[in-house]
Image (spheres, grey):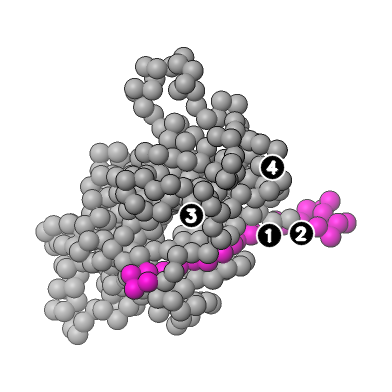
Amino acid sequence: MTATPAAPPTTTDDVVLEAENLTKHFPVRRGLRDLFTKERKAVHAVDDIQLTLRRGRVTALVGESGSGKSTVARLMAQLYKRTDGDIRLHGDLITVNGGRAFRAYCRRVQMIFQDPFASLNPVHTVRYHLTRALKIHGRAGNGSADLEQNLNALLLRVQLTPPERYLDKFPHELSGGQRQRVSIARALGANPEVLLADEPVSMLDVSIRLGVLNLLRDLKERLDLAILYITHDIASARYFADETLVMYAGRMVEGGDSETVTQNPAHPYTRLLIESAPDPDRLDRVGDAKDAPEDEAGGEPPSLIAPPTGCRFHPRCVHAMPKCSTDLPPRFELPLVDSGQAHWAACWLYEEGAAK
Ligand code: SF4
């Protein structure tokens, strides 16, 4: 196995949005005690992220709460200023500081938030939300007949039918799933190329999650959208995403096609994530030593104000070696499984000659 440099894949025709060495540190407010030191503390929320979103593909970004995945989505949406790194749209470097440039960027890159109730204004109807999106992005058409036709088309696209039943409803009159569909329709009002979906189903009832994921998959195929799917549920990534990337404590630790990452996880943290998901078959095998979880010693995610040196997972890793606490592991390419797609892990276990 060979170490690869941290560079993203070469830009090809189907690449829409890329992040290169994306980094975000949030400064911590100085307390009284800190006034006498020169030290400036910061939360290292995201460090050195490489991400490529392609037309007609879903990329899942998986990790536990606080791993930095939502920060990545907000950086890609230009809602946060980045500390370092580049974002490229169709190969062009993008830096947006609000105003007209931000609106032009939003026309191509839209975000869907976790809580559809919070993202819709409770005093306005579905018609108001969608009309506003169409007008801001110059897609309302000429006159009220055009507008009505475009509103109906948006609701039909998110499978809220018949549209006239929903147009004049307020958010509180809709179910959670219907509200999230309205949020998706509003995002589609811009006719975007990229959807950044931040935990789009985690606040919905289990029974309607699948419907919303199927809708997003249908939109991906029909509109050729590039979708970033942020989730803590690695099982849904296998179902929905073409590619899966795993984040831990602000860094990416594993990536590859979803089937390979979820069925043949390489990084100890990915294995821990999968083993932490409820599985009735595993409960039957409790006590079987070979099924002992990766995280036998337990442990919590580290503080991101002073993250662990070397591999950030080393305080929790049952395979940790001396160099894990001092040296940051690069990405190691792994042997291809059936899919033939690249698979990598940032873990010293995969260095040439390392004992597994
Ligand atoms: Fe564990 Fe070391 Fe691999 Fe980190 S680099 S996951 S500590 S074995």
Mark in front: 4 vs 1: 4
The image shows residue 47 at horizontal and vertical percentages of 60, 57
Classify mark 2 as within 8 Å of ligand 1 or not, answering yes or no: no
Provide the secondary structure element on which disc 4 rests: helix
Q: Name the residue type under label 3.
A: Ser
Image point 16% across, 68% down: which residue? 153
Mark in front: 3 vs 4: 4
Q: CA distance from mark 3 to mark 1?
A: 18 Å
Provide the secondary structure element on which disc 2 rests: loop
Of all residues, the one furthest to the front in this rendering is: 353
Left or right, 116 with reference to 166: right
| Residue 16 inside the magenta-drawn segment | yes
Residue topped by disc 3: 70
Image point 34% across, 22% down: which residue? 281
Q: CA distance from mark 3 to mark 4?
A: 30 Å
Image point 25% across, 55% down: which residue? 217
Name the N-terminal-most of marks 3 and 2: 2
Residue topped by disc 1: 27
Q: Which residues are magenta?
A: 12-40
Name the N-terminal-most of marks 3 and 4: 3
Q: Name the residue type under label 2.
A: Arg
Q: Assess whether mark 1 and mark 4 are in contact (beta carbons under 8 angstroms).
A: no
Name the N-terminal-most of marks 1 and 2: 1
Classify mark 4 as within 8 Å of ligand 1 or not, answering yes or no: yes
Q: Name the residue type under label 1.
A: Pro
Residue topped by disc 2: 40
